[in-house]
Amino acid sequence: MEKGIFNGTETAWRHDGNGRDVILLHGWGQNMDMMGVIEQHLIPFFSVWNLDFPGFGESSDPAEPWGVEDYRIFLEDFIEKNKIHDPILIGHSFGCRVAIRYAALHHDVYKMVLTGAAGIKPKKTAKQELQTKAYKAGKWFLKATHQDKKLEELQANAGSEDYRNAKGVMRATFVKVVNDDVTPILKDVLCPVLLVWGDQDAAAPLWMGKVMEQQMPDAGLAIFEGDDHWAYWHQSERFNRVLDVFLKEDMK
C-alpha cells in the first residue's frame, strides 16, 4: 500500500500490473478491499489502481465537508500526479458519481464500468416531503430552545443508515453527496459505458440504470436478475466475465 497527498488529503492506494490504466472507485462507506476481487482479476492484463477515497479506509478525512465536485478534483489530482493516461474507470455506487463527473469533463476516459450507480436524485413522495419538513421543524425548535441532548437523539435516529454511521466531517459530506444529481451531464459522458445492475437494487433502483443507458451516448445495460445493490460482489465471477467481454480488446 502507498500513501500520498491529493487535493490536500492523505490518500491510500494499491497499484499493480502493466498495460492500460484501470482505476477502481469503491462505494460509500466502503474501501479498496471491496474492489479487491476485480483488482486481482485485472492485474494480469492491466495497470490497476485501487484507492481508498478520502474519508474511508486508510485515507484521511477531508479537512472540511466535500461534495462530489471535490471528489472529482481529488480524482483529477490523483490521475495527474500518478501520470495516468486514458484510464478505464470502474466504480460502484458512490464511486460512480465521481466517475461520471470526471468523465463528463475529461473525454480522454477510455471506457467506464458502472455498477449500482448512484447519482440520479429521485423525486420525494408526499410522505417523504412531510417527514423532511417535520424533521427540519423539530431540529429548529430543539436548537432554539437549547435542548442539545434531545437534538442529538433526533439527529442520531434520523436519515439513512449511511447518514447515521457517518461521523464528524463525513456526515456533512454525505448530505452534500446525496443531494448531487448527475442527470444533466449524462449526455456529456462520451466514452463507451457498461452499466451493470441488480434488478432488485433498492439503493439505486433499476430505473436509474435505464435512464443512464438512454441518456449516455454510448452505453449498454447488463441486468443481474434477482440481485441487489451489491450484485457485482455477490456474483463476482459473473461480473468479471462480463468485464472480460467489455475489455477483451484492451487486455495486454
Image: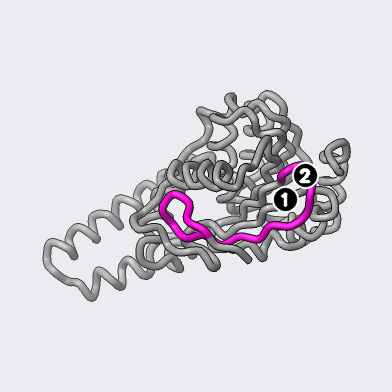
Task: Give the residue at mark 1.
Answer: 198
The quadrant in which the N terminus is found is bottom right
Residue shown at the point (68%, 39%) measured from the top left:
87
Q: Residues within 10 Å of mark 2 (few under 14, many from 20)?
A: some
Question: Picture quarter containing residue 83?
Answer: top right
Circles 1 and 2: CB distance less than 8 Å?
A: yes
Range of magenta residues: 4-21
Residue shown at the point (57%, 60%) measured from the top left:
52
**Magenta-colored stretch includes residue 26:** no
Task: Give the residue at mark 2.
Answer: 223
Helix, strand or loop for disc 1: strand
Question: Which amino acid lies under the numbered mark 2 shown in the image of this protein?
Answer: Ile
Closer to the camera in the image, 9 or 164: 9
Helix, strand or loop for disc 2: strand
Percent position of residue 11, x then y: 52, 59
Percent position of residue 58, x then y: 54, 68
Q: Residues within 10 Å of mark 1 (few under 14, many from 20)?
A: many
Closer to the camera in the image, 12 or 195: 12
Question: Which amino acid lies under the numbered mark 1 shown in the image of this protein?
Answer: Gly
Residue shown at the point (24%, 60%) measured from the top left:
139
Q: Is residue 127 visible?
A: no
